[in-house]
Amino acid sequence: MNLFAKNEPNAPKSQADLIFEANQRKELQFKANVALSWMVLILILIFLFSGQNILGIKTIQLDTTFIKDNLVFIAGGLGQTIKISLLSIVLATILALLAALGRLSTFPPIYALSTFYVSLIRGTPLYLQIFFFFLALPQLGIILPGLWAGVIALGLNYGAYMSEIFRAGLSSVGKGQREAAIALGMTPGQTMKRVILPQALRFAIPPTGNEFIAMTKDSALVSVTGFVHELMWRSTKVGRAQFHNLEALIMAAMFYWAMTLLLSYLQSRIEARLSKGDR
Amino acid sequence: MVPIVKISNLDKYFGRLHVLKDISLEVMPREVVCLIGRSGSGKSTLLRCINFLEVPSHGTIEVDGVKVEGGEKGKINRDLVHEVRLRTGMVFQEFNLFPHMSVLENVIEGPVQVKGMDRDKAIALAEKNLNHVDMLWKKDEYPMRLSGGQKQRVAIARALTMEPKVMLFDEPTSALDPELIGEVLNVMKKLALDGMTMLVVTHEMGFAKDVADRVLVMGDGEIIEDAKPSDLFTNPKDPRTKALIERYRSGEQ
């Protein structure tokens, strides 16, 4: 028998090869059809805002000169939006980790502080919390730039929700891992840092990506205070001034959507990399 | 000779359940002691009390001259427990290798983090021990890619690299496919020949018969028999021991 039969161009294909190729064709076809359907949906969306009146279907008329004139001004808010989101997610991650660790504490005040924080923040609306930080902090004599007050509010809020993610991550690490570390003579601190946390964080990365995507959009709420000139603030400002609210909001929506698409793509890349490794 | 492990009047309660009843036991250096008995007899709990993975409710544990009193969880002398853990190595049924570290990283983790050993020195020691369990060729693999028997041999090397005085084995072959049990038992046999003091909780009667110096039979939280394997397997005294040995004989045929 010729062991190298597979490499010969005219060798007959095996049953397994044929099934594999058929499956691959199916998968490709599915992807192509999904892409095509997306195109159709996007065309419908564009048509809805085209101002055309075809077959008696009413569509929305947008002022294109307004859009052109204000594109640069609104896009100028992207930097602030990204900055708020990045700073907030860093703060939220730290708080979430501390809160999740606090839930493991056997020292009552620490446990209480952690549950109190999560309960209070999850029990009140984010919109209200953002106002609260702008109103309350100056009364305490703390005057922060608008951006930082927004970051604190968003970070505290998302930290409370994300603490549940980290808690799940920590409890996903088996009891045997802790025992193995202890049996080697590791202290509780070493066990947490060297054995439990690295495994818990790997579990927590994909859901944290989700939270980050959600946060880029919730950063729009910071605009209500009027001190942070991010995407939403800029679009409401020009929209109101020139009576073109709808155009301005649609432009903001496009920017948020584009950011989200990019972030989702990055997240899927990270997830693929995590699942490929040694796990 | 002075015993290297000395357990005196040990009691352990799980809630209201009295799982270990006034146990006293001495193990001499270089001795290989197998603990057998039905599940729920307390053999694993006894082993786990030695390095305080379970805190004894009463009684004392002494390992290589370090003596720790049992009692309430919060009132145990942590420094002494740490000293005991440095003198004992443990091998678990489920291996418990760290999945985020390579084989070599698993093995040097203890010496580097706990003893503060120089990394190069730890690697040399780890490679020597990995070679001893015939796993050096897989040193850069991650545990995920190893078979159960290979994982357990790495776990043994990890415990050995802490240079313990006593090795504790908690059912080291119970989670393995039958064809992989032999390679782990062979490594353990090799350790016994090297002169390591070993306490082995096991269902492997063949190993107890061939390798152990002494076999302890546990039942209902007590040591019901303590004998040389040659005596125990030919002339069991307690009816519970007889039942155990008969079951082993019928399984063997």
Image (cartoon, rainbow, N blue to C red):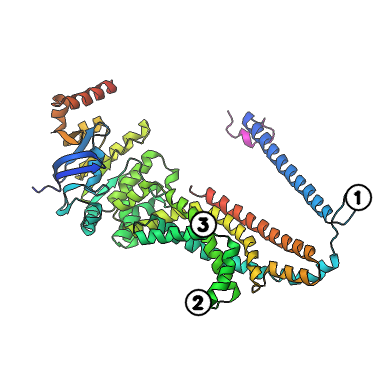
In the image, residue A162 lies in the stretch drawn in magenta: no
Circle nearer the N terminus (3, 1): 1
Query: Circles 3 and 2: CB distance less than 8 Å?
Result: no
B245 vs A21: above or below: above
Please rate how many residues cluster around mark 1, counting C-alpha atoms within 10 Å: few if below 14, some from 14 to 19, many from 20: few
* Mark 1 element type: loop
The amino acid pointed to by label 2 is Leu
User: Label for residue A54?
Assistant: 1
Identify the residue at horizontal 27%, vertical 54% (top origin).
B162
Identify the residue at horizontal 43%, vertical 60% (top origin).
A114
Residue tagged 3? A162
Residue tagged 2? A140
Please rate how many residues cluster around mark 3, counting C-alpha atoms within 10 Å: few if below 14, some from 14 to 19, many from 20: many
User: Label for residue B157?
Assistant: none
Q: Does A217 sit left or right of A56 as displayed?
A: left
Residues in magenta?
A1-12
Q: Does A168 sit left or right of B49 as displayed?
A: right
The amino acid pointed to by label 1 is Ile
- By secondary structure, the bulk of the magenta-drawn segment is best described as loop
In the image, residue A11 lies in the stretch drawn in magenta: yes
Label 3 to label 2: alpha-carbon separation: 28 Å
